[in-house]
Image: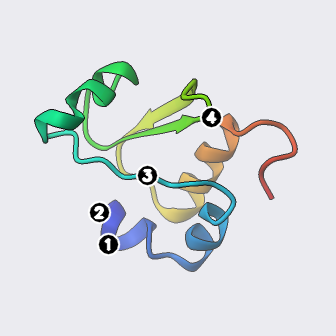
Amino acid sequence: MLDRQTYPDKKVVQFLGQVVPVKLNADIAKNGKLGEKYGASALPTIAVIDANGKLLGKFIGFMPPAEFIKNVKRFMPAGRSK
């Protein structure tokens, strides 16, 4: 649902232009360590990570575009989100 409804949304695309979005398939064994590191216990898990790999926050489950942006902004450093 994120792939069909949230990620293609114009506002989400514009918002994510401020960051480096990375999508991992947690079912693939080689990515399992990252899922483990950031506590991905369910799919989808959205993790907000800084440039040093520090987990700033995460949320789980589908969210429509406006809610998705709001949740990502909660974890972004002050002055970083527009």
Q: Position of residue 63 (x, y in %)?
A: 44, 53
Q: Which residue is drawn at 35% across and 43% down?
A: 61
Give the Cα distance between marks 4 and 2. 25 Å
**Whether label 1 touches label 2, CB < 8 Å:** yes
Q: Which of marks 1 and 3 is nearer the N terminus?
A: 1
Contact, mark 4 vs mark 2 (Cβ under 8 Å)? no
Task: Report helix, strand or loop for mark 3.
Answer: loop
Task: Name the residue that disc number 3 marks.
Answer: 22
User: Whole-percent x and y of residue 49?
Assistant: 56, 34
**Residue beneath label 4, please?**
50
Q: Earlier in the sequence, mark 3 or mark 4?
A: 3
Tag 4: Cα neighbours inside 10 Å, few (<14), some, or many (≥20)? some
The answer to whether the residue labelled 3 contacts the one labelled 4, judged by CB atoms less than 8 Å apart, is: no
Alpha carbon of mark 1 to alpha carbon of mark 3: how far?
A: 17 Å
Viewer-closest of 28 and 65: 28
Horizontal arrangement in the rendering, residue 2 relative to residue 78 (left or right): left
* 3 or 2: tag closer to the N-terminus: 2
> Between marks 4 and 1, how big is the CA–CA gap?
26 Å
Disc 2 marks which amino acid?
A: Met
Which residue position holds label 2? 1
Q: Residue 60 carries which label?
A: none
Q: Nearer the viewer, mark 1 or mark 3?
A: 3
Residue at x 84% of width, y 38% of height: 78
Instruction: Please state which amino acid type lies under the numbered disc 4.
Output: Asp
Instruction: From the top left corner, tell me how far across and down residue 51 is, in percent.
Output: 63, 36
Q: Mark 1 points at which residue?
A: 4
